[in-house]
Image: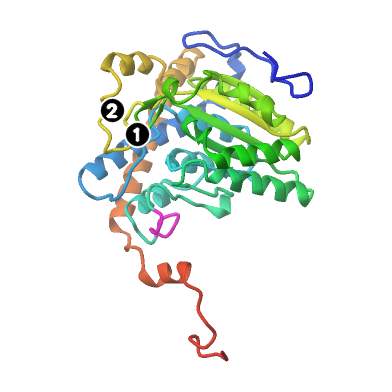
Amino acid sequence: MATSESEPRIDGAAARPGEASAYSVEQREALVPLYRTMLLIRRFEEEAARAYAQGKIGGFLHLYIGQEAVAVGAEAALRRDDYVFQTYRDHGTALARGTSARACMAELYGKDTGCSRGLGGSMHFFDASRHFFGGYGIVGGHVALAAGAAFKAKYRGEDRVSVCFLGEGAINIGGFHEAASLAGLWKLPLVLVVENNSYAMGTPFSRSSPVEDITRKAAGYGMAGDRFEGHDVLLVRDRIAQAVARARAGEGPTLVEVLTYRFRGHSMSDPGKYRTREEVEERKRFDPVPLARARLLGWGIDESRLRALEQSVEDEVADAVRFAETSAPAREDVMRACVLAERASDAGGRA
């Protein structure tokens, strides 16, 4: 259903679990690195969970297991100079963006070699060199920042797009509405990607929203909308690429809803008792990582090649854990320099 004649909805019906995707064998080489990155995220998160259970990681830990196709597919649709903003469930997006597994794991361990110098922890990954600006713990608060980056790009005439990931629980936050309204009004090059994993913490989406289709809200902000299942990384790439192309062409923002699912609790402290075992196991039938592997095998990729790729991922994650465990801890002087401004008199200069 179109939002309106002036705010068109991107063509294409939502792909349902189990449907065949219309991709040719020629896509197989493009899928190989996407599969590797999804597997890297999966194994990274599993080892992070293990370290957390052993008391080596403190604070909160929100895992991306089950949602890998969203971050990886979206990244494949972006350029390296585009802006990316994420919520506190940020490990997968940072890895997809190109931040090293070493820097990510060290950050979880609170080490100075981490991507945020060990000061941010799990919820506050940051890599300015890759235009990855968070990692934000305040639900919906980062949407305005992403809109600000999009405004900056448009104001300066830059050919750049700002992509903001958020959970479905953030769509009723004031900051989301304010940012979306201005983005639509000014036709900012912004793509809002709602990762709808069905539960805002432990609250089912049906108990927090009067409408099932989030993209119906797009018309109210004068933007396009698109909604689809997020278990197929190639589908995610292609559909988000359409929204990115619209933004880059000056046609305004898009509200994208990707239907996905997290296989673990909201965080490591969440036992997930609000879901049945049967529900989780049913959704695991559409796990994006083994689905991608099965597709590659079906397309004729030799299994020995995949095993070599998978071993390289195991080696990379193991190296990241060793690096994190042996790195120096976060430093107090770095923390103070990041938080406090030094007066000239304190530095020995003139007051």
Q: Main secondary structure of the magenta part?
A: loop
Q: Give the residue pinned by disc 1.
A: 266
Residue 101 vs residue 337, the one in the foreground: 337
- Based on the displayed image, in which of its 4 quarters is residue 312 positioned? top left
Residue 34 visible? The answer is no
Report the magenta residues as a range.
113-120
Residue 332 vs residue 166, the one in the foreground: 166
Q: Is residue 115 magenta?
A: yes
- Checking the image for residue 272, the label placed there is 2
Residue 29's place in the image compared with 2, above or below, is below
Residue 66 vs residue 8, the one in the foreground: 8
Residue 109 vs residue 261, the one in the foreground: 261
Give the residue drawn at x 52%, y 88%: 345
- Based on the displayed image, in which of its 4 quarters is residue 192 positioned? top right
Q: Is residue 304 magenta?
A: no
Residue 311's place in the image compared with 274, above or below, is below
Q: Where is residue 17 drawn, in percent x and y?
A: 47, 11
Element marked by disc 2: loop
